[in-house]
Amino acid sequence: MTDDVILKISHVSKSFGAVQALNGVDFELRKGEIHALAGENGAGKSTLMNIIDGILQPDSGEILLDGQVVRISSPAEAQKLGIGFVHQEISLCPDVSVAENIFMAATNVSRAFLTDYQALQRDAGVILSQLADIDPSWPVRELSISNQQLVEIAKALTLDCRVLILDEPTAALTEKEAQVLFQIMRRLADRGISIIYISHRMAEIFDNCDRVSVFRDGRYIVTHKVRDIQPGTIVNAMVGRMIDNLYPAKMTAAQTSDEIILKVSNLSEAVRFNGISFELKKGEILGFAGLIGSGRSEIVKGICQLEGTVTGDTWLNGQKLALKHYSDSIAAGMVYLSEDRKGDGVFLDMSISANVSALKLGQVSGPLGIINTDKEDGQAEKLGHMLNLKHGQLSDPVSSLSGGNQQKVAIAKMLSVDPKLIFLDEPTRGVDIGAKSEIHRILRDLARSGVGIIVISSELPELIGVCDRVLVVREGSISGEVAGDAMTEENIMHLASVLETQKKTA
């Protein structure tokens, strides 16, 4: 990192109607540095990045690149100026190949009459070799979410960037993939490329970034050198208050119940998991850990009859279930909150009220099946109040909400059917630390009220902080359980990744 400023934002403001998204913001990015941008959802980070990328235009203020005032009218103009942007939300074309996605921008401006697909795949393979073993000829729709994120990053690496913006790039990556990305980031910075890194994960910021700037409520707050501060300093600047208890108190021994909410026995599916047996007790939060691809999400989806042909037995509150479809699971009182909030968790273009009622429209419909909007709004208002949902009008689309509040709408949708058990897959992915704390509180309150809670998460501190027990999944089987003082990152990772060679060779 040098002291040369490559990008300077000066007194930039942006409003959307009555909402002041940015208010006189200043920001400086130096040549060859990795500069973290921290702040709660709604702090203005994405708005500023969209202005830098030409997606939005500022109401006032200036952008200077290499000391020269520039007007960035579009993403194409940003690319010409050497600015690349890897968005948090995946925006690939699912029906064409990985290689075509990576070089789509170059292909669009090419004057060639025919595309040399072999050369395209060869060049894509060279770039992908830095990231992961992904076949450039595969259609994108066949890739996992984590591999799609890596393709998005590969697209950015093809650009001749001077400034690279990465918005929550590790949200869908495994730990191994994330470490590869961090190595690439450092190599790019060593070559003089400047990186703006947006993340809610303090460990990533402190392990990989040179400086960090904090935004709050559309205003620039402070910039620090990472080596000079502690994570608590950043968290307190982000929220404007102290967050002492990110995780609520767990069950005490006196609160422990022997009443079983869910019992699963010898659950199996032809390819993805086998011989799964476990119990969930009333009042506890049970966690599922495991590397991506281990089968943890597939097990839960199998229980709910969302995927695969599953054998084995399941009991809910002592009642043996015979489920054939997810609708049967909902009727029985078991619901699943997807890890893909934008794709499966909420309907972004629909209203808050319509989202909350979507799982069981009969609750808010009249005798002819016509939606009673008063009932629908009343249900959304009640659940929104319970979850401390921050919103404008209930008729506003969910896309108008911050990531944390979108997740609360998704949880409200689950609660609208009065569930006995909720499976939550990556419940706090892509939400800020304040919203995480609130969601953790909500889950504990639900567990104390008697609702069964099972959490799947890639964030080990979250599992350790919020769960009473954690089951670890490896290669489609439960490799072990941790609880109490044994619930450590080291023990979980050992169970998740170490090959039991003695068993294999016995």
Image (cartoon, rainbow, N blue to C red):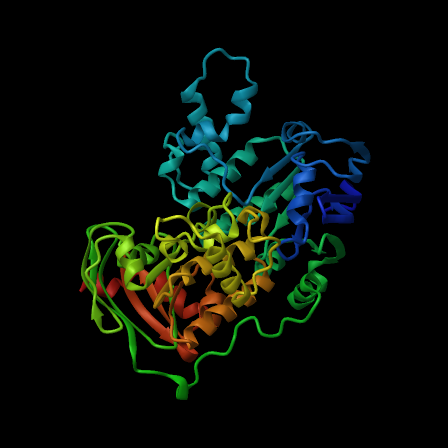
In the rendered image, the quadrant that contains the C terminus is bottom left
Residue 461: image location, x then y, percent: 49, 67
Vertical side of 318 occupied by 412: above or below: above
Looking at this view, name the residue that lies furthest to the bottom: 254
In which image quadrant can residue 438 be found?
bottom right
Residue 385: image location, x then y, percent: 55, 65
x 68%, y 36%: residue = 56
x 34%, y 56%: residue = 297
What is the count of numbered marks? 0
The answer to whether residue 427 is visible is no
The answer to whether residue 267 is visible is yes
Residue 327: image location, x then y, percent: 29, 54
In which image quadrant can residue 251 be found?
bottom left
Which of 97/328 is in front? 328
Drawn side of residue 486 relative to residue 171, left or right: left
x 46%, y 32%: residue = 126
